[in-house]
Amino acid sequence: MEWHVTNRQLSKKGDYLKRKIINSKTLLVVFMSLMTIFVVIFYRRPTPTIVSQNIERAEMLSQAKQLIDIEKLNKELNEKKVDKERSQQLTKTLQDAWKTLLKNETTKFDIAIYDNRTDIYVTYSNKPIPHFYTASIAKVAVLMEVLALDEKGIAGLSTQEQRDAELMITKSNNEVTHKFVKSRLGDYLEIDHLFAALNMSDTQANKESWGLIQTDALDQVKLINAIFGEQPYNRQQDVTYIQQLMSRVDEEQQWGISKNANRYYLKNGWLSLDGKTWLVNSIGKVADQNADYSIAVLTEGNQTFTEGIKLIEKIAGETYKQIEQLTIKD
């Protein structure tokens, strides 16, 4: 079959193609115009004035940030400098005061404090190797280790044991302390785990008696900090329990590190090994508005029990006064 195309048909076809081409060109022109407008609006190149303003603004922001950073750094350095100066001042003040106060003292003593405000330890002793027996201040460590064993899965304190713990700390009862050591710790050396954990390197258990644990004042302050510090040895509920007991010591036993303080927690110990002289110790925490520190004062060779108390309170009272004065001055 043949197809015959007339001139008329060709003319119509040509007109159609021309119109199509014209329409396409028109659309292209419109499209290009719209693209030009879009580029001008959204991608226009900043003028030199705008660029200059942006650079100036960026420089100002950078300079402001540098000033803020420098100010912050200077503040931190100044705070560290002030803290260092406070620490040095407290150390010198206390050691000078102790030296003057005890220059004629023949009874052996060992003093240590940890000042919570300046985060420093200060010590002073007239014994070349300051090792002392604990006597009844060891009862705090005994209770801490008993409660720590409870955390490890051993049964908690019974009602009777709670009464015994109160007697041990508030009345310094020896019988219940023996009972705790035998029934809970197993032997006298078990408590060395506590001393090792607290880095009490100069404290060592005695295999025959909790009262003859060898220690020094600095280690006893570490022990107190493990009750009142930010990283306690025991669970918080047990720490609170120990603190409560140390705040309720019988009135007749509230002598020692409490001298001049209004709010304190303590445990005292005393023992005569030879029947002639006395070792008398006092450890605890002072938590007044203007005095916040842990303290231990250990003594031996006192002619009487009463003289031992007087010596400790002379030291503790002077310590409180010096720390309070420095705090108020700041």
Image (cartoon, rainbow, N blue to C red):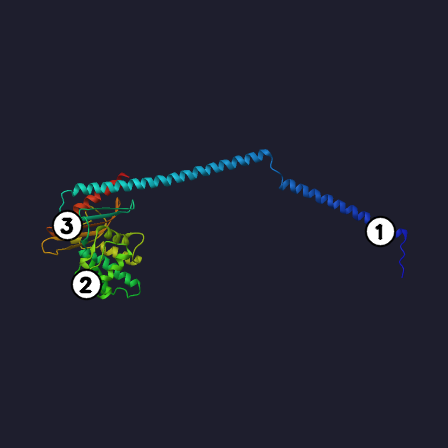
Is residue 171 visible to us here? Answer: no
Residue at 28% x, 42% y is 87
Q: Is residue 123 left or right of residue 279?
A: right
| Residue 59 position within the rendered picture, expressed as x and y whole percent measured from the top left | 50, 36
CA gap between label 3 and label 1 equals 126 Å
Residue at the disc numbered 2: 178
Locate the N terminus and report the quarter of the image it occupies.
Answer: bottom right
Residue at 65% x, 42% y is 39
Residue 184 sits above or below residue 231 on the image: below
Residue 9 sits above or below residue 157 on the image: above
Dot 1 crowding, Cα within 10 Å, few <14, some 14–19, many 20+:
few
Q: Is residue 61 left or right of residue 320?
A: right
Which badge, 2 or 3, comes first in the chain's sequence? 2
Which badge, 2 or 1, comes first in the chain's sequence? 1
State the image quarter where residue 183 is shown: bottom left
Q: Which mark is residue 317?
A: none
Residue at the disc numbered 1: 13
The residue sitting at the left extreme is 276
CA gap between label 2 and label 3 equals 25 Å
**Residue type, numbered disc 3:** Ile
| Residue 176 position within the rendered picture, expressed as x and y whole percent measured from the top left | 19, 63
Dot 3 crowding, Cα within 10 Å, few <14, some 14–19, many 20+:
many
